Amino acid sequence: MVNLLWMDVIHVNFIKRAGLTLVAKKGRTALLVLVTTAIMLFVLAGLLIRNAANTATATAKANVGATLTLSQNRAAAFKTMRSSSQSGSKPTLTQTPVKLSLAKQIARIQHVASYAVTVTTSANASGFDAITTRGTTGGFGGRGPATTSGDITISGVTSTASATAFNQKTASITQGRGLTKADANSHNVVIESELAKQNSLSVGDTIKLKATTGSKATTTLTIVGIYKAKSTSTGMPGESDPANTVYTGYGLANQVKGSKYVNTADNVTFTVSAPSQVAAVKKAAKQLINTSKYSITSDDQNYQLVKSSMATVSGFANKIVWLVAIAGTIILALIVILMIRERRHEIGVLLALGEARWKIIGQFLTELFVVLLVGIGLAAAGGKVVGDQLAQQVVATQTTQSATTGQFGRPGGPSGQGKQLPGGGQQTAKTNQAAKQTKLATHVTVQALALLFALGLGIILVAILIAAAGILRLQPKNVLIE
Amino acid sequence: MLTTKGLGYWYANPEDYLFKDVNLHFDAGVMTAIVGQSGAGKTTMLSLLAGLDKPRAGTIAFRDEDIAKLGLTNFRRHHVSTIFQAYNLFTYMSARQNLLTAMAITQSAHRGDADYANQMLGKLGLTAAQMRQTVARLSGGQQQRVAIARSMVCDAELVVADEPTGNLDEANTQAVVDLFRQLAQDLGKAVIIVTHEEAVAAQCDAVLRLASRTVSWERQPSR
Ligand SMILES: Nc1ncnc2c1ncn2[C@@H]1O[C@H](COP(=O)(O)OP(=O)(O)OP(=O)(O)O)[C@@H](O)[C@H]1O
Ligand SMILES: [Mg+2]
């Protein structure tokens, strides 16, 4: 028992000396803490950004592929059009709307939770004015597959809640109500607030729309709700002002479009109960459809974008961690080498008293270890602030880059253009916006601190190892006897 | 206790040796003075005897065991205690902490005993306030006495000192010489003191002179 205590005293002695030194040389200790804190702060910031990027990717992945979209196989349709134009006949793009019966069939596949129908067409305002400020009408054609344009875009939906704009929160109902399943064939309409304001329309009023296709009949609709669109026109030629989009039930939209469109849709979006089931549902759906006419796609565009941009962020963060760790090791090693030179006399006295060299190295290591703990503590306190700032910078730079790629990096050439979905550019712009909105929230976690501690320990160990040569070479006589 | 065999030392080249083929014996209970002109090699000789440096030629044996085999660090820790011309204290520690640190490193029987450290510092004329004081704030003479106290709290059987009274007044010099005498006579240690003070040398049991590359007994230790 007594022996054990003595052993403790012997081995703990250099640790006690380390403490004495740290307290006695406050200035030096403060300087060491400052340098270590700075190094730890940047390493931690890097770790936090990396974690945040990984979390963002995981979140995007979790949100991905919950939907599948059934639409006409446009690539195949364009191919047919081109080959027919080569054979001399007049090129026509065959419109093959999706039959609702097919949608119902697919909806019966296991794990399909619900489906939403979208029918897009256009009509002319009758007795009221469409918004013209941004050059709405023209020969370019409106949005969607309508071949003849009107100044009002009709978006026929299963319900407004399932419509993309409302889904992605770029539009919201401000007055009245949205459309539900029950409105499929009703004459109810939801219009944009600017259109309502310009024409002094409010909930309960009626508007008239004159079809530009089919029977070219005029339909009277009752306003049941007014929505506000957040997105404004991107000013692209031929793009209709978003405020001119009205929402109706898909049945009514089909009536306006023409009698041959009854019980069809431009596209149908299926919601799958679990993202992990999407691939299986897609496979099953493909068996039901004629793939040369229709295509079924999972919407992981957003995920792919977030994934690639976060991979860049994460890679950048990794570089920060390694660069700072390496630079920090070199800086600390230099400081320790200088410190050992400055303390040659003290080391000489210890050696003269018969202290083992490893215990002297142990004393320096203990001193740095205490400094490291304080440094990590301070870094943990300031890490979130620095991490958030850095993350903001990184994401800003990153999304600018990816947006540029999105706009100019598309495959060029006429055939490439042909394959591009109408409105595809807009789609990319929207997705980019989503990526830009991906806020990197950094959190100082126990795991991050544990990793930081491990890295910090590695840094001081390597620094001491480099500097220890000075202690191992030192001859007490040379420093103690002048 | 300590025996040199064919001991030789030089700094730059062997022709300019300070001494060579030195055969000496230092016994327990004997206080020996090393005298000689400045630059004769007294400090150099002492550093060899204290295990701070390796001889260029010959061997040093402690209780018939080659100190090179014993390991110089081990030899310094357990068997020899050195008092330097330049004190060589831990300047940022108090006098007492200096003693406690040395006691811990040398694994002295009294390690951890602050009272024992105080007692020894008191014997050397330091006040309670001076014991707590950072040694950097003590005078040269006070620091020298702390250095002597440090060597005394360690249990080494061999005590070597380089000009231990160099910075002391007559009264303190006599007190220190008396302490060294006690170490040799009462505790049976071998004490070796480098000194240029006739009065100190006169009180030693033996006197070794270093002069013109020769080492000789001016006064032989009485057997
Ligand atoms: N590290 C060294 N390198 C080269 N020469 C040295 C070194 N140390 C001492 N010398 C030389 O060795 C000789 C002996 O030095 P030493 O210090 O042993 O003398 P000393 O007898 O102790 O002198 P003093 O009475 O002045 O203390 C001197 O000529 C000195 O110049
Ligand atoms: Mg000397």
Image: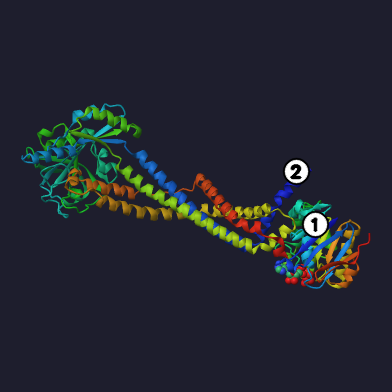
Labels 2, 1: one chain: no
Q: Nearer the viewer, residue A304 or A319?
A: A319
Q: Where in the figure is residue B27, as x and y percent of width and height?
A: 88, 58
Badge 2: residue crowd in 10 Å (few <14, some 14–19, many ≥20): few
Which circle marks residue A274 in the picture? none
- Residue under the image location 56 percent in, 58 percent down: A332
Is label 1's Cβ within 8 Å of ligand 2? Answer: no
Amino acid type, residue under disc 2 in the picture? Leu
> Along the horizontal axis of the image, is B204 left or right of A414?
right
User: Viewer-nearest of labels 2 and 1?
Assistant: 1
Q: Where in the figure is residue A1, as x and y percent of width and height?
A: 77, 41
| Residue under pointer 2 | A4
| Quadrant of the drawing holding the C terminus of chain A | bottom right
Is label 2's Cβ within 8 Å of ligand 2? Answer: no
Residue A288 vertical position relative to residue A22 in the rendered view, above or below: above
Which circle marks residue B80 in the picture? 1
Amino acid type, residue under disc 1 in the picture? Val
Badge 1: residue crowd in 10 Å (few <14, some 14–19, many ≥20): many
Residue B138 visible, this angle? no
Residue at mark 2: chain = A
Q: Where in the figure is residue B170, as x and y percent of width and height?
A: 87, 72
